[in-house]
Amino acid sequence: MAEEVISKERINYTIDLLVTMVVDEVSESTGKNSKDVLVDFILSKTGKTLYDDSTKLWCNGPSYIAEMYMDEISKK
């Protein structure tokens, strides 16, 4: 079976959607403003890893990524 090639544009779109879902989930569970969560997430190690499409983190669901981020910020 041939491997399907996903365009960079589709990957970026998927990542952006995941960020939206992760921010909503984290904001809801922490009670923090979603705009603040968005900025913190984008600057975090998890956010940077997600935007590095070679890591394939974008293949995971938003709950997995939100949990990864929550683990990261709990260690600060």
Image: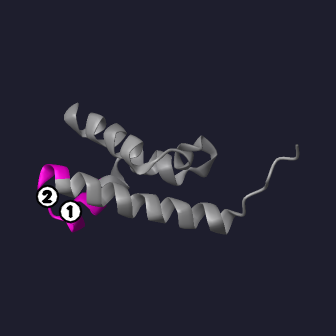
Secondary element at image label 2: loop
**Residue picked out by circle 2:** 32
Query: Is residue 35 shown in magenta?
Result: yes
Asked if residue 53 lies left or right of residue 20, the reply is right
Callouts 2 and 1 close, C-beta under 8 Å: yes
Check disc 2: other Cα within 10 Å, few if <14, some if 14-19, many if 20+.
few
Q: Nearer the viewer, residue 43 or 58?
A: 58
Q: Nearer the viewer's eye, disc 2 or disc 1?
A: 2
Task: Please name the amino acid that badge 1 sits on.
Answer: Asp
Eyeballing the image, is 65 above or below 23? above
Q: Position of residue 12 (x, y in %)?
A: 57, 64
Which residue shows up at 55% across the image and 67% down it?
A: 13
Query: What label sits on residue 36 in the rendered view?
Result: 1
Q: Position of residue 44 (x, y in %)?
A: 34, 48
Check disc 1: other Cα within 10 Å, few if <14, some if 14-19, many if 20+.
few
Query: Is residue 6 shown in magenta?
Result: no
Residue 45 visible? The answer is no
Region rendered in magenta: 29-40
Residue that extends furthest to the left in the rendered view of this protein? 31
Real-space CA distance between mark 2 and mark 1, rounded to the nearest whole angstrom: 7 Å
Q: Position of residue 74 (x, y in %)?
A: 20, 34
Quarter of image, res 71:
top left
Asked if residue 56 lies left or right of residue 26, the reply is right
Q: Nearer the viewer, residue 76 or 53?
A: 53
Eyeballing the image, is 75 above or below 63? above
Secondary element at image label 1: helix
